Amino acid sequence: MSIAERRERQRAERYELILAAARDLAEAEGWDAVTTRRLAALIDYSQPVLYSHFKGKADIMAAVATRGFEDLATRLTAANVTGAPDVLRNVCAAYLDFARARPVVYEAMFVLPTQIKFASEETPPALRAAFAALVAALGPDRQGSEFLAEVLWSALHGLVVLAQSGRIPARGAEDRLNILVQKFRSDDGDPADRARPGAGPASRSDTERAS
Amino acid sequence: MSIAERRERQRAERYELILAAARDLAEAEGWDAVTTRRLAALIDYSQPVLYSHFKGKADIMAAVATRGFEDLATRLTAANVTGAPDVLRNVCAAYLDFARARPVVYEAMFVLPTQIKFASEETPPALRAAFAALVAALGPDRQGSEFLAEVLWSALHGLVVLAQSGRIPARGAEDRLNILVQKFRSDDGDPADRARPGAGPASRSDTERAS
DNA sequence: CAGATAATCTAGCAACGCTAGTATTTCGCG
DNA sequence: CGCGAAATACTAGCGTTGCTAGATTATCTG
């Protein structure tokens, strides 16, 4: 059985090789430059071996994205030390740092079309953990904190993608982060504590249709 | 000179025909389905005529996006009636309504790679106008209101793209809008205004527009 | 009406994701 | 050790993409 084990190990190594090659090539020239032919050349195999590991190019990108979820979750939970001052800011900064450090991985995770399920039972655990860190950073649980976290996430995501595509200037990222954190801080600039408007968002459900 | 004029007019008509075909096809099957061959077939011309109007497929999409900027600017300025209660909410709702009504145009404007310049001298006037409406909705000018508007825009954009790609559920869009508006409302107003964020002009904004 | 010019089409290139069929290597077993 | 079987990787190719060169047709001018 040792032979089969070695084969299995070598297969796993090649799997990693493909993922690393894809990520490196994407980081160097963007996802459009990641073609099956170039990937095959990088790992010194012919094209079809890729299809013995992955269903196709989209599957390779999804695998890169899954690794990214783990990386992001690690960073966010590390930044989310309960009791520390300004937890919210630390978590938000960690999110933006990740996007800056691994832009193409971020793209695979959150921008490009994907078959990965979000907000469902099949959602990868790492992704759930990352989102949970975001929820926790917003303070103690109250009704509608799920929605609140989604809005915060949207803002962070918007900052990332608009900056990455050059639609908002790279200058001022720090200032924007400060504004965002201030707006979402539970004790400052937020009238929710005094007025408790609508007791959270659940009161009026959406009336628009889905499709 | 009349002959040349007629030719010019016919060329302009064909230009519009191409744009309409591209937008319609994208709305029906997504931008990936918009190929030069299918476009040519739709307008009953051969492929190369497209290249007498546009530099390439990306240029066609940029033209669709430019039209979208005008549409969006019209909607945002219309929603931005100074003095009306809850201007901020109306403008945000108008933004989200536009994204829901014309998802593929929105994609061409703000998601897909583009050579359109943002925040520069070459920025299309309509785009500047749309952003100005956003700035105005945030209240009286003060220092850093440019950054503030960019953060708001990021949040709106994040809500749009994460919903469009299925990364946040379609359910609850109204609640998220309420949260966002509440967070960005200027703090120097009457606290009574914030008592019921779902009330008032909210009902108009989520009526689905024609598709 | 003939020649020049402009407009349009046919045909093709290189590159893409992906796959069928073939060659090669490796394994199990006598 | 040797030989069929099975796993494994490769060559070659299909259909499609964006885009373009060269031939062809239509239009205008002298």
Image (cartoon, coloured by chain):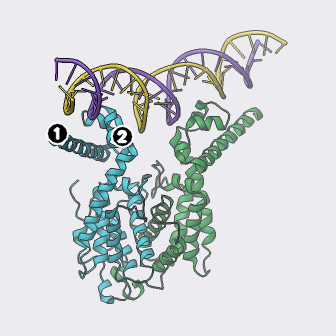
Chain colours: A green, B cyan, C purple, D yellow
Q: Does residue C28 appear left or right of residue A205 in this picture?
A: right
Camera sees residue B108: yes
Residue located 63% across and 41% down the image: A18
Q: Which residue is mark 1?
A: B3
| Chain label for disc 2 | B
- Same chain for mark 1 and mark 2? The answer is yes
Callout 1: chain = B
Q: Residues within 10 Å of mark 2 (few under 14, many from 20)?
A: some
Quadrant, the N terminus of chain B: top left
- Reply above or below: A149 against B33: below
Task: Bin the neighbour count of mark 1 within 10 Å (Cα to Cα): few under 14, some 14-19, many 20 and up.
Answer: few
Considering depth in this image, is C3 or A26 the residue closer to the camera?
Answer: C3
Q: Dot 2 corresponds to which residue?
A: B33
Q: Above or below — where is A3 with respect to A175? A: above
Total number of numbered discs in the rendering:
2
Q: Which residue type does callout 1 highlight?
A: Ile
Is residue D4 left or right of B135 when viewed as pictured? Answer: right
Residue type, label 2: Ala
Give the number of the mark in front: 1 or 2.
1
Q: Is residue A73 left or right of residue B111?
A: right
In the rendered image, the vertical position of residue A187 relative to residue A15, given as above or below: below
